[in-house]
Image: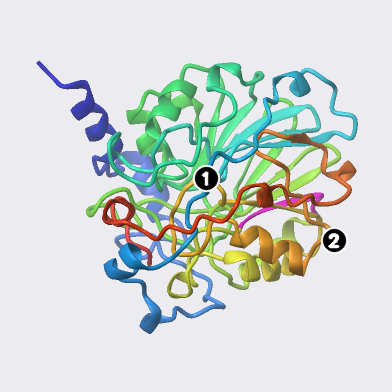
Amino acid sequence: MTNPIDTEVHMALFARHANGLRLERMQASAQYGGESFVNTYPSSTPRAEDDKPSLVDFIFHGEGRTPPKPLPSIDPRAAWTRPVDTGLRTTWLGHSTVLLEIDGVRVLTDPVWGERASPFSFMGPKRFQPVPVNIAALPPLDAVLISHDHYDHLDYPSIRELAKLQVPFITSLGVGVHLEAWGVPAERIVELDWWESHTLPRGLTLTAAPSHHFSGRSLHDRNATLWSSFVLRGERHSVFFSGDTGLSPHFSEIGQRLGPFDLVMIEVGAFHPSWGSVHLGPDNAISAWRQLGSGRFLPVHWGTFNLAMHPWAEPAEVLLARVPEGLVMPRLGEVIEPARFESVEPWWREISAERSKGCARQAAEFLVLPAKD
């Protein structure tokens, strides 16, 4: 008799490889380097090789990496029933999962409801607390958007649940090989190369754009699928979503070619100097925002998983100190219209800093994730 846990791990972790027309499209991409995808823009932040964290660091160093109690959160369901007065509304649901309501169209970004950013239910970085609502409680969606295939962005149980909905999945080249294996019909999967676009029936256009990152879910599929940022442009509003990325000249080009933006959602957490080419952190996120040239700034990729050495709230503190104007930092599950968001309230300070250091289990769980570039 097949163990359902073993089956789930196999489905989440098993390295899949594209073939047929999907593989032909991937190989025709300017981002394809012969055997895998490559970063085609130079990094603006070289890696600090001599500062790479070790297993000892994860066990004995890095205080405050997890909050000592649940973050304040809000049930968004009542707010979702009210009209969107300005035409643009967002709900941060944790990490890079955001429900975007833009000019009458709803798009869910990088949906992760799973308890762990890992193929295993018993091991791997565990989320600080559940998502404020379950998938069944979401309002009707028009599309699901997935930037790349890492576990904290492409979550097997979440995709299995969302596959039951009759909505398209928009993603980067090659990622559809996972979606199809997990039950999303091929006709509802749209895979885009950088600068390619897809327009939904209700008029919203989604364009894949460059990012500086990597991909892979096992030891055998490194960079087998593409990673992207995305621009969503409706009748009156435009939003930029960074996915995962390091700093590179692509931000300026995106701003010039696809801007201006009303809102930019940029990754700010789970960073380290030795990962500078593939993650931003708050300081480089500010640089990226300035290079994009427009829009209110909604930070994502923070406050959900312990994925790095820094204190969990450090990105928020840095951003508030450096760029309080233009910053949008809602509570978990808080439904906001960016144009009406007046000022940031440092709600994360309600939770005292965690003083305990890392432990062996946390270190082992962290190592479940694909190695940083």
Q: Where in the figure is residue 254, as x and y percent of width and height?
A: 69, 61
Whole-number angstrom distance, CA of label 1 to CA of label 2: 24 Å
- Could you classify mark 2 by the number of other residues whose Cα lies within 10 Å: few (under 14), some (14-19), or many (20 or more)? some
The local secondary structure at tag 2 comes to loop
Q: Which region is colored magenta?
A: 261-267
230 horizontally vs 344: left or right? left
Residue 250 image position (x, y, % from top left) = 62, 67
Mark positioned earlier in the residue sequence (1 or 2) = 1
Q: Is residue 308 above or below residue 192?
A: below
Residue at 37%, 48% (x, y): give it.
24
> Is disc 1 placed on a helix, strand or loop?
loop
User: Which residue is tagged 2?
Assistant: 325
At label 1, the amino acid type is Thr
Residue 304, horizontal then vertical, whole percent: 52, 45
Quadrant where the N terminus sits is top left
Quarter of the image where one finds residue 135:
top right
Q: Which residue is mark 1?
A: 304
> Between 168 and 292, which is closer to the camera in this rendering?
292
Which disc, if any, is residue 210? Answer: none
Q: Please name the residue shown 77% across and 23% down the image.
A: 79
Overall secondary structure of the magenta stretch? strand
As drawn, 325 above or below 85: below
Q: Position of residue 108 (x, y in %)?
A: 61, 33
